[in-house]
Image (cartoon, rainbow, N blue to C red):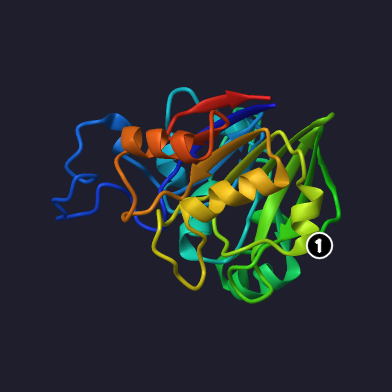
Amino acid sequence: MKIKFLGTSAGWPLPRLGCSDEICTSKDQEDRRTRSQALINEVLLLDLGPDTYQHLSQPQVDPTKIKYAAISHEHPDHTFGLWDLSHIYSKGGRDRIKIIINDKTLAKIRFMFFPGEYEIIKTQVESEIEVNNLKVSLLPVHHTKDSSFGVLVKEGVKGLFWAPDFKSLPTETARKLRNIDLVAIDGSELKIKTPSHETIEEGIQLGKEIQARKVYFIHIGHRTLPHQRLETFVKKIGGKNFHIAHDGLEVGL
């Protein structure tokens, strides 16, 4: 499985406009982050934030190969790229991209879909969708009321769980993730606790509890640390299997 992290920021990009803190004034390119999104095996997009057009305009990405997109939840930083995604053209014409989404999430953003632009695949919790040689399912997470999910992607015996926004995981979701190859999880906060997001410290504990082989933090927020210091922090507290993703990072399973 080929995983390309197209974006890794929380709801607002980094640097923030007008900000002069240590993250926003950093000269490290890895501290420049756009909204969290990933591309799997060149055919499956995970989430559709407002930076989608920018992400798919990169020379190393061929947007005409994209066949599917899975949406984790309804918030703008995960859905406002729907319009841009509907206008991908190829030499042989335009194929409708298939959007994998839960009923409850769809109900909250239905106004954003235009007739004929997409093929919508409404999926029940935990049911698998075949995407080329991938199997995709949505597992519940605690973030919004009944409409937030993590995306589980399997290729053979390998597995990825994409969960950019959550406060905690239901017991059954955590059980299904035990010993998974890679989780990409919420890094909105370092230590400050909020009602709808875990902290990175909590994410390290979660990664240990489910015994994930690799943990990458995404959805990196403004109240964390510059990239290199944050990478050092998670390795010191968590160990060598913990990482901070950055825009453009590619990982293979």
Q: Is residue 129 visible?
A: yes
Residue 156 vertical placement versus 217 (above, below): above
Residue 224 vertical placement versus 67 (above, below): below
The crowd level at tag 1 (other Cα within 10 Å; few <14, some 14-19, many 20+) is some
Left or right: residue 195 compared with residue 67:
left
Q: Position of residue 140 (x, y in %)?
A: 72, 63
Give the residue at x 19% y 32%. Answer: 27
Q: Which amino acid type is marked by label 1?
A: Val
Residue 156 vertical placement versus 223 (above, below): above
Q: Position of residue 23 (x, y in %)?
A: 24, 45
Read off the residue under disc 1: 125
Left or right: residue 16 compared with residue 179:
left
Residue 127, by quadrant, is bottom right
Q: Quadrant of the image for the N terminus? A: top right
Residue 227, by quadrant, is top left
Q: Quadrant of the image for the C terminus? A: top right
Left or right: residue 229 compared with residue 8:
left
Give the residue at x 21% y 46%. Answer: 24
Q: Position of residue 188 (x, y in %)?
A: 43, 56
| SS at circle 1 | loop
